[in-house]
Amino acid sequence: MSEAQAFDTDARTEAPLHGDEVAVLRGMLAYQRDTLRWKCAGLTQEQLAMTLPPSDLTLGGLMKHLALVESQWFDHWFRDAGFAPPFDTMDWDTDWDIDSARHDSPKELRALFDEAVRRSDAVVDEALQRGGLETQLALASPQTGETFTLRWILAHMIEEYARHNGHADLIRQSVDGQTG
């Protein structure tokens, strides 16, 4: 019996067609997050671990990787609070997040992803109250020495999800033929 969770595509968050910059950015990010949830929904652990050669990416690996990316940008860079577990002990010289997902159940992957999103949303809420989209990160870019703004991070996260959701589309279609 599968631990896979279904996803109601009719309930997928839609970005507002009208609204201020915050509402549109957050709506677009929520839409991309829900798209990943949809692409990973209803599958078994074995299906979440399937690849589409020649790539080693899996749907479960993408879900775990994007949970890491959430922690990286919002826990580490934005708050300077380090990485949330289990990423606080990962081996950065490997693709641990993607490779280790093969051993995680659908329920574990979804819980890890949802918790990362919850933490990130709390950071965004606090930052918006404190200083809006121009709120600066706690840490500076090692490349430029400049800090990022919350606006930049939200736009980057939309970009990150959109790119990986393209991968998820292809992998999901190869797993069970689902498109959309």
Image (cartoon, helix red, strand yellow):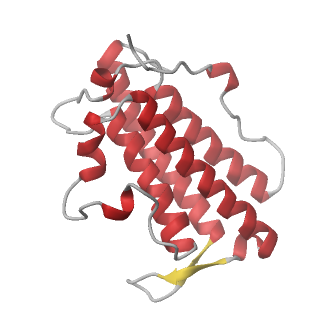
Name the residue rendered at 44%, 49% in the picture.
Answer: 66
Residue situated furthest left in the rendering: 54
* Percent coordinates x, y for residue 22 in the rendering: 76, 58
Q: Height in image: 61 above or below 91?
A: above
* Percent coordinates x, y for residue 94 in the rendering: 19, 58
* Percent coordinates x, y for residue 166 in the rendering: 41, 37
Q: Is residue 48 left or right of residue 135?
A: left
Picture quadrant where residue 49 is located: top left
Location of the N terminus by quadrant is top left
Residue sitting nearer the eye, 155 or 96: 96
Residue situated furthest top in the rendering: 1
Q: Is residue 150 left or right of residue 56?
A: right
Name the residue rendered at 48%, 35% in the picture.
Answer: 110
Residue sitting nearer the eye, 16 or 9: 9
* Percent coordinates x, y for residue 73 in the rendering: 50, 65
Residue situated furthest bottom in the rendering: 145
Name the residue rendered at 23%, 53% in the picture.
Answer: 95
Name the residue rendered at 65%, 45% in the picture.
Answer: 28
Q: Height in image: 164 above or below 38?
A: below
Residue sitting nearer the eye, 86 or 57: 86
Q: Height in image: 41 above or below 150?
A: above
Residue sitting nearer the eye, 74 or 168: 74
Counting the numbered discs, the total is 0
